[in-house]
Image: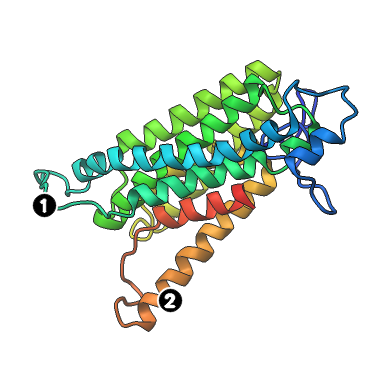
Amino acid sequence: MGSSGSSGGDLGRTGRGEDGLFRQRPRGPAKSAVEAVDADSGARRTGEAPADYGRRVILLPVVAALAGLVIGLRTRALIARYAPAEGEPSRPSRSPSPVVPVVTALALGALALRALADRPASGAFFPPDATWVGELLAFWWLAVITVMLAFIDLAVYRLPDRLTLAAYLGTGGLLAAAALAGGRLDDLLRAGLAGAALAAFYLALFLVNPAGMGLGDVKLAASLGTALGWLGWDSVVIGAFLGFVAGGLYGVALMAAGRAGRKSEIPFGPFMIIGAFAAILV
């Protein structure tokens, strides 16, 4: 959830910046959280003992994963509500996959780990700044909603408008708050442009081949593109590419197993999500 630089940066910049939540990883062996604090000569210390600092760094992903389990248990009810086809009443017996809480927990924990990966090297992690918190909340929000969307799409080949809209508004709103708090308006503008560009790309695919792409995918692309655009244009390209690779491999595997033909319909939303988060976490 990092970015491509400070507010005075260039919109065409493609790398992940030094000030964002997900910064570009430095080369060479990484310092531990405790080592990073000890190496700082006291000028930028947070006032905490090194051991406590390290524990708090480790604690965030654990708490995030536990919160993901709880949230995942709650969102299973929402998945059950949206999973039936249009006009079909909700059936309690049609229980969503029990792995929903596990996937949600892994997603939130992994995002927390990635956010912390290089942050201690700055020597000033605690207390976290408002921009950092806003970025992390934005990507956590996107993860929770897209996990729901992925399981719904797998079940009924549909991406509900309410959830795709929630993903877009929540992610965009939290990133806007982060941008305003940290003077990162260039990153926010790039994120907005990327969301529009990726949605336009998927819309073009839908217009060319409506049977192969749905409008739900177009709407989902807006929120994924916004999140990836906050990181940089390279992340947008990589995330979209990985989504097509994942979807293609899934289709080939189904055909090899005799479970699908060349013209069989497959839900593409989950693979868009997998590609996007692979680009975010790498």
Q: For residue 267, which quarter of the picture?
A: bottom left
Q: How many marks?
A: 2
Name the one closer to the observer, 144 or 82: 144
Q: Residue under circle 2?
A: 252
For badge 1, the amino acid type reads: Ser
Q: Secondary structure at mark 2?
A: helix
Residue at horizontal 49 percent and vertical 42 percent from the top: 108
- Say if 190 sits above or below 282 in the image: above
Q: Residues within 10 Å of mark 2 (few under 14, many from 20)?
A: some
- Say if 266 sits above or below 41 in the image: below
Residue 93 image label: 1
First-in-chain label (1 vs 2): 1
Residue 121 in view: yes
Q: Residues within 10 Å of mark 1 (few under 14, many from 20)?
A: few
Residue 278 rendering spot, x and y as whole percentages: 57, 54
For badge 2, the amino acid type reads: Val
Q: Secondary structure at mark 1?
A: loop
Q: Nearer the viewer, mark 1 or mark 2?
A: 1
Residue at horizontal 63 percent and vertical 44 percent from the top: 114
